[in-house]
Image (cartoon, rainbow, N blue to C red):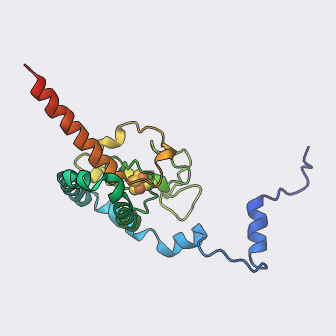
Amino acid sequence: MPDPETPIVTQAMRVRAAAGRIAYKPADVSPARRVQRRYAARLWSVRHARFLERLYGRFADLFLMLHPLWNALGYRRVEAPVKFVERRVKGLMFDCRMCGQCVLSSTGMSCPMNCPKQLRNGPCGGVRANGNCEVEPDMPCVWVKAWEGSRLMRGGDAILDVQKPVDQSLRETSAWLRVTATAAADRAAAAKAKDAAP
Ligand code: SF4
């Protein structure tokens, strides 16, 4: 039983206290990095959710149009270069974490994987009065932003759809290629059903 008089020292408090006197200074500790970036690009994307929704729609159509090319080259072979571009573009614009099952079109262009709790269906109960995250006090809650972004989008009500839990086995895979291949398969199945209809 802990002594109620003894102050509780957490692991995080120990690490913080030691930070000034030890030689190892991690280059990529998230709080400092995040303060530096100030989430500018991510917030820009939310503010321009309508424009990005349109752009994404065109881009998805183009990718689907190129399905025969992806097929000819082999989805496996194009995966690495597509992933390279996807990671950089979406990383820059949305702080994408490459979960492989993108839901940006349902979340006002605010990536839910940036939520420290990785909630995919709305905020927790800890959103601060200023709309920031309870875990990362300097960060706007991704779900508050998601709601704002969704109100700008034509298909913004998709935010009300219940998202499935994240499938961790899809991490580090290309959502662009998955969406394209799925749309191509659906299109082929629809065409087949139409042909088979009396
Ligand atoms: S939902 Fe997944 S794929 Fe989409 S931006 Fe976020 S981490 Fe990237």
* Residue in view at x 12 percent, y 24 percent: 196
> In the rendering, at what x and y percent does residue 38 appear?
47, 71
Residue at image location 65% in from the left, 74% down from the top: 26
Q: Quadrant of residue 125?
A: top right
Placement of the C terminus among the 4 image quadrants: top left
Ligand 1 located in image quadrant:
bottom left
Q: Nearer the viewer, residue 6 or 189?
A: 189
Q: For residue 191, which quarter of the picture?
A: top left
Horizontally, residue 9 falls left or right of residue 124, namely: right
Name the foreground residue: 101 vs 140: 101
Q: Is residue 60 visible?
A: no
Left or right of residue 179, residue 66 in this image: left
Q: Residue at x 61, y 76 (%)?
A: 27
**Residue 178 placement (x, y as % from top left):** 33, 48
Q: Which residue appears at 40% of the width and 63% of the height?
A: 87
Position of the N terminus by quadrant: top right
Horizontal and vertical percent for residue 103? 37, 48
| Foreground pick, 136 / 24 | 24
**Residue 72 location in percent, x, y?**
23, 53
74 sits left or right of 135 in the view: left
Task: Evaluate whether residue 21 shows in this view.
Answer: yes
